[in-house]
């Protein structure tokens, strides 16, 4: 009877270890639905903070989110590739930016906002 108990305990340990290694804590995971309202709000926050930090000189306007990753840390980090328009005209030039935002209960912080591709419409 003891060997059976030992095998069950060993199986339980293996299952627990495989669950821990599959845990996304600390690792970047793809965001399944980049069109989710919360993800859209995070992207708008990033563009708005970028505009504020640049004193609204040549403001950017969010057009779409192209890709997103999430990381569980002290809160959540969101890394988004966003397409933005430069200026307010509908035919304005656009660029792709990569941004990272840390989200904690009651707070958002822009980590970075960098242009990665300049595109002409």
Image: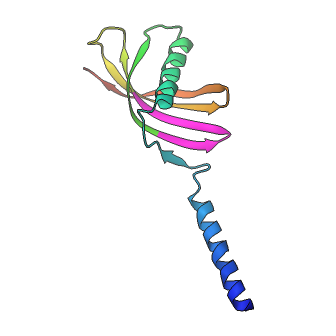
Q: Is 21 within the magenta?
A: no
Q: How is the image coloured?
A: rainbow
Identity of the residue furthest to the right in this view:
2
Give the residue displayed 63% in from the left and 77% down from the top: 11
Which of 16/45 is in front? 16
The answer to which image quadrant residue 22 occupies is bottom right
Span of residues in magenta: 69-82
- In the shown orientation, is residue 18 left or right of residue 74? left
Quarter placement of the N terminus:
bottom right
| Residue sitting at x 31%, y 8% | 89
| Quarter holding residue 96 | top left
Residue at the far front: name it: 1
Task: Estimate the x, y position of residue 87 in percent, counting from the top left.
Answer: 37, 10
- Residue at 71% x, 91% y is 3
Main SS of residues in magenta: strand
- In the picture, measured across the screen, residue 56 lies left or right of residue 26, that is left
* Residue 61 picture location, percent across and down: 40, 16
Horizontal placement of 45 versus 26: left or right? left
Residue 46 in picture, x, y percent from top left: 52, 23
Q: Residue at x 26, y 12 (%)?
A: 91
Q: Is residue 71 on the magenta stretch?
A: yes
How many numbered marks, from 0 up?
Answer: 0
Is 26 located above or below residue 6 in the figure? above
Q: What quarter of the picture does the C terminus occupy?
A: top left
């Amino acid at each position: 009877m003891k060997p059976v108990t030992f095998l069950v305990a060993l199986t339980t340990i293996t299952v627990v270890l495989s669950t821990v290694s599959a845990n996304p804590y600390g690792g970047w995971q793809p965001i399944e639905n980049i069109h989710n309202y919360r993800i859209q709000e995070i992207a708008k926050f990033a563009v708005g903070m970028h505009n504020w930090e640049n004193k609204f000189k040549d403001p950017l306007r969010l057009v779409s989110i192209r890709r997103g990753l999430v990381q569980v840390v002290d809160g959540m980090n969101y890394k988004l590739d966003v397409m933005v328009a430069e200026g307010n005209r509908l035919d304005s030039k656009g660029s792709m930016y990569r941004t990272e935002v840390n989200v904690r209960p009651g707070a958002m912080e822009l980590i970075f906002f960098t242009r990665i591709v300049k595109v002409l419409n």
